[in-house]
Amino acid sequence: MTAKESGKTALGRCAEIYENRSSRALELKREGKRVFGYFCCYAPLELFTAAGIIPYRIMGNAMESTSVADTYLDINFCPFVRSCFDVAMKGAYDFLDGILWPTSCDNLTNLHGVWDYNMKYPFTYSLDIPRVPDALALKFFTEEMHLLKEAVEKFIGVKIGDGSILEAIQLHNRNRALLRKLYELRKSDPPFIAGSEVTRVLVAVMSLPVAEANELIAELIQQVEDRRDVPPRRRVRLLMVGTELDDHRFIGMIEDCGADVVIDSLCVGTRYFWKDVTLDGDPMTALSRHYLQDILCSRTYRGWTGSTRLEEMEARFGQIGEMARQWKIQGALIYTLKYCDSEEWDVPDLRDYLQDKGFPVLHIEHDYSTVALAPVRNRVEAFVEMIE
């Protein structure tokens, strides 16, 4: 159902889906559709769409204690992964027909066995993702993608043709283009849409079939362009870089401190939609190349790409620097989850890179929970006052 059909604004529809993410997936289940869960930007969504399977992003609950997960997982487990496991053990993902496990981080890899032991899905698969994006790794990853395709075909009992994959790539590229267009509306001062509103939109579209998501985003863009209740102008424009952040309350807290998050490089953000899948040659190779090389996550080591440290940092963080320039930011907030080693290792270089470009930087290490944000709020308030 589109926003027009429901009689709600597209923003209202996104907020509704955000608060009850599984509602549409359960409707589709009753209609006989299959739904697969996935964790991060490295899941090849096009392959599932081509198979007639609904990809559904697994998230935790930042407002709920991890009372069940705490009895299973070590205390130094990633708080986001812990929360995902907790809500799953409480029944939040019982409707899934399958789950894709990416080897994108140690915590997800280590959780795989515990999750599968306690929750049985008809389909489960571990996708091995290389840590480097060179030619040899691409050859290996393309073979891994073909094995995943064969496993999905065996599960659904139908071959997935190149035509279906190409059509799915086009649908998901359309999704990426629409989200980038939505982000363009944040360049104005004040932005046409607030960062907390965008978080709701992103979570909502990750909970819908891609064709429905595209219709919703297209309606949303039109309504945002025409809206009269533009969010108020805040005192500072911020870039946000980091890991998993899917709770609008955290962004809302930053806004309450007098800052607009106008652009980001987050897992639930530009990281998964900033570049299209290039449609040339074999579609499976195109998908493999995109998911191995185009997603700028710190877990992938890209090697030494320059003769000086400055050139190296520009190669690694140049996309973030260009975002900072185009969206005219005044400061940057680096957000990392506790125990996320790869993101933490990036922090010193990323901080130096942004500061060398003249931007003040605040680094926040967080536990994913938004139950008690007072200590973080104090730091953000002081940061905003410093920039003014």
Image (spheres, rainbow, N blue to C red):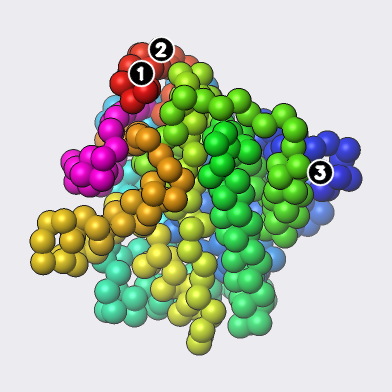
Q: Of circles 3 and 1, which is in front?
A: 1
Amino acid type for the residue under numbered disc 2:
Ala
The answer to which image quadrant residue 202 occupies is top right
Whether 200 is drawn above or below 307: the answer is: above
Q: Residue at image x 27%, y 74%?
A: 134
In the image, 169 versus 225, the foreground residue is: 225
User: How far apart are the alpha carbons under marks 2 and 1?
Assistant: 17 Å
Q: Work out whether mark 3 precedes mark 1 in sequence or the reverse, and give the earlier one.
A: 3
Residue holding disc 3: 3
User: How far apart are the alpha carbons under marks 3 and 2?
Assistant: 35 Å
Q: Is residue 204 in view from this perspective?
A: yes
Q: Residue at image x 52%, y 67%?
A: 276
Residue holding disc 2: 374
Across and down, in percent, residue 293 comes to: 36, 67
Residue holding disc 1: 385
Amino acid type for the residue under numbered disc 3:
Ala
Q: Of circles 2 and 1, which is in front?
A: 1
The answer to which image quadrant residue 8 occupies is top right
In the picture provided, is 308 more to the left or to the right than 223? left
The C terminus lies in which quarter of the figure? top left
Question: In the structure shown, which secondary structural element does the residue marked by tag 3 occupy?
Answer: helix
Which residues fall within the magenta stretch? 340-367
